[in-house]
Image (cartoon, rainbow, N blue to C red):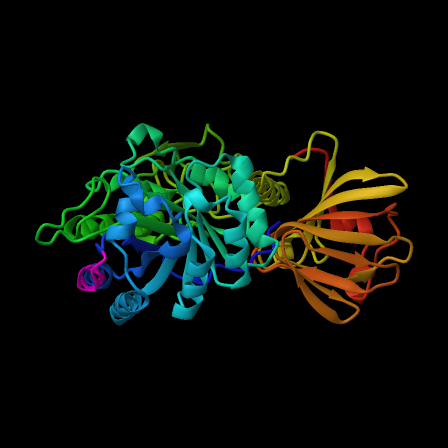
Amino acid sequence: MSNGKEFPLVAGGDPLVIFEMANNHQGCVEHGKRIAGAMGHVAREHGLNAAVKLQYRDLETFLHPRAVQEADNKHIKRFLETRLDDDGFRAVIDAIREEGMRVVVTPFDEPSVDRCVAHGVDAIKIASCSADDWPLMERVAQTDTPVIASTGGLPFAKMDNVYNFFTHRGIPLAMLHCVGIYPTPADLLHLNVIDRMRRRYPGVTIGYSGHEDPDDTMVAAIAVAKGARVLERHVGVPHGDITLNAYSMDPEQTGKWAAAVKTAGRMCGNGADKTVPEAEQQSLLALRRGTFSRGPMGKDTPLDRHSIYFAFPCEEGQLTSGQWRRTMRADRRYQADEALFVTREPTLVEQVRDFVHEFKSMFNEAGINIGREFTIELSHHYGLEQFRETGALIVNLVNREYCKKLVAQLPGQRHPTHRHMKKEEVFQVLCGDLTVCLNDVTQTLTTGDLLLIRRGDWHSFTTTGGVIFEEISTQHLPDDSHYQDAAIKAKDPMTRKTVMERW
C-alpha cells in the first residue's frame, strides 16, 4: 500500500487542470501575463480547478560551458532565447495568482528547485525526462512540496521506482500517464494504461498529460472517464509574429477542451454509487408487464401459471412479472383479466440469497478470489431482519492449529462486542474501512492496517463504507465467542448463523 499523503490540489474536489505554458511565454513577461489572462478567462468560464505550469532552468549551471556554441541543438537555442530572470518569473506568477489559478513549476536542476521553494509554488512537476534523475528528485523530495510526475517513455518497472521513491518519503504524489511524442497520434495514446496505473499505484492521484492534436477533445473526455484526476495540456496565445507549435492549444481550442473535460465529469458522476431517480423508475415501470387473473379466483388461490398471465401495460402498484413468485397466493377475490395487487415479504431463502450476492459482488469488485474450498457463514446476531444493521459474512478457509478467515461487512454494518478466551487473532484490512473498539479504545483501520486482538480482549467492529478484512488466528472453536449482550448469549449459537458451502 502507499504511505503517501492525499494529493491536496484535488482533495475532495474537481480534477486539477494544468495549463502548460512551458516556454511559450517566449522569454517575454508581458506575453506570459497575456497567456495567464487568457487561461484565467477559460478557467472562470468553465469553473475549472486550474493551474498554470512554468519551466525553470538555471542556465548558468544547467548548460555545459560549450553548449552556447552548439547552435545546431534546437533545445539549447530555445532555452537561451526564452530565458526569464527571477523578477520576470515572479511577475508571471503574480499574474497567474491574480487570475485565481495555482502555480506549478517543472525544475530541471537543483538550483531551480530552490527557486520553486523561494517562489512558493503549489506543486513541483517532474518531467518525463527527469523521472530517473535521482539527484534532482532527492532535492525535490526534501522540499516536502506536492509532486506531479509524468511517466512518458517509462516502462512500469521504472514507474514503480518513482512511485516508491516519493510514497516512502510521505510526499503527496500525482502520477500522469504521458506519451512523449509531439503531437501524439491516436494509435500511440494507450489510454488504457490509466486503468492499470490506478490499480498498480494505490493511494496516489493518477492523471493524464496530453500532447495530441489541439483540436482533439475526445482524448481528454476519455481520460476523465478512465479516472484521470489531473489533466495537463500545452497552451499558448498567438500574438504578432508568435505562433503555436503543433501540440499547443490556443484559447479557443482550450475552451472547447475544458468544456469536454467538464461534460465528461458530469457524465461519469462520482462513481461511488448508482442512484436511480424517481423519474427513471416511473419510466421503466411504464414499460413493464403486469400480472393479471386468467379467470375468477378466490382468496388464497395459488398464483401459478394456470391462474395468472402477464400483459402490458402495468398499472401503478400492480404486481409486475418480475415481482411474481410461484409461492404467492391471491390476497382477495379477483375477476377475469383483473390486475393483481398482491404484496409479500421476501422469504428467508430470498433474503439470504440477496445478501450473499451482494457480498460476492464486493469480493469481485475488490479482485479477491476465495478459491473453491470454503464455507460461508452469515452471522445475524439479532435475526436476518436486522442483518443489514448487525452482522457480518465470514468465509472460513482454514481451521487447523492455525485459522484463516475473510470477514466482510456491508456499509454501516456492525458486529457486537465479544471476546475469545482461547483464540488470539489478527485483523488485516484488504479493502474499505474498519473501526474497531478494543477494550473501550476505538481505532480506525484502512487498507493494509493490522490489529492484534489477544485472548480475553473485548472487541466490536463496524464499517462506514463497507469492508473486507483477513482474520489470521489460532484454531477457532465453536464455543469460544462470548458476547456481552444477554440477548445474544441467550440464543443457541446455531440460530445466529446461516452456513453455506458455495456463493
For the C terminus, the quadrant is top right
**Helix, strand or loop for the magenta stretch, by majority:** helix
Magenta highlight range: 27-37
State whether residue 480 appears in this view. Answer: yes
- Relative depth, front residue between 42 and 89: 89
| Picture residue at 63% right of the left edge, 56% below the top | 446
Residue 481 lies in quadrant: bottom right
Location of residue 157 in the rendering, given as x and y in whole percent from the top left corner: 55, 36
Residue found at the very far left of the displayed protein: 240
- Relative depth, front residue between 396 and 485: 396
| Picture residue at 54% right of the left edge, 48% below the top | 134
Location of residue 54 in the rendering, given as x and y in whole percent from the top left corner: 32, 57
- Relative depth, front residue between 258 and 479: 258
Question: Relative to residue 440, is residue 127 depicted above or below?
Answer: above
State whether residue 327 appears in this view. Answer: no
Residue 285 lies in quadrant: top left
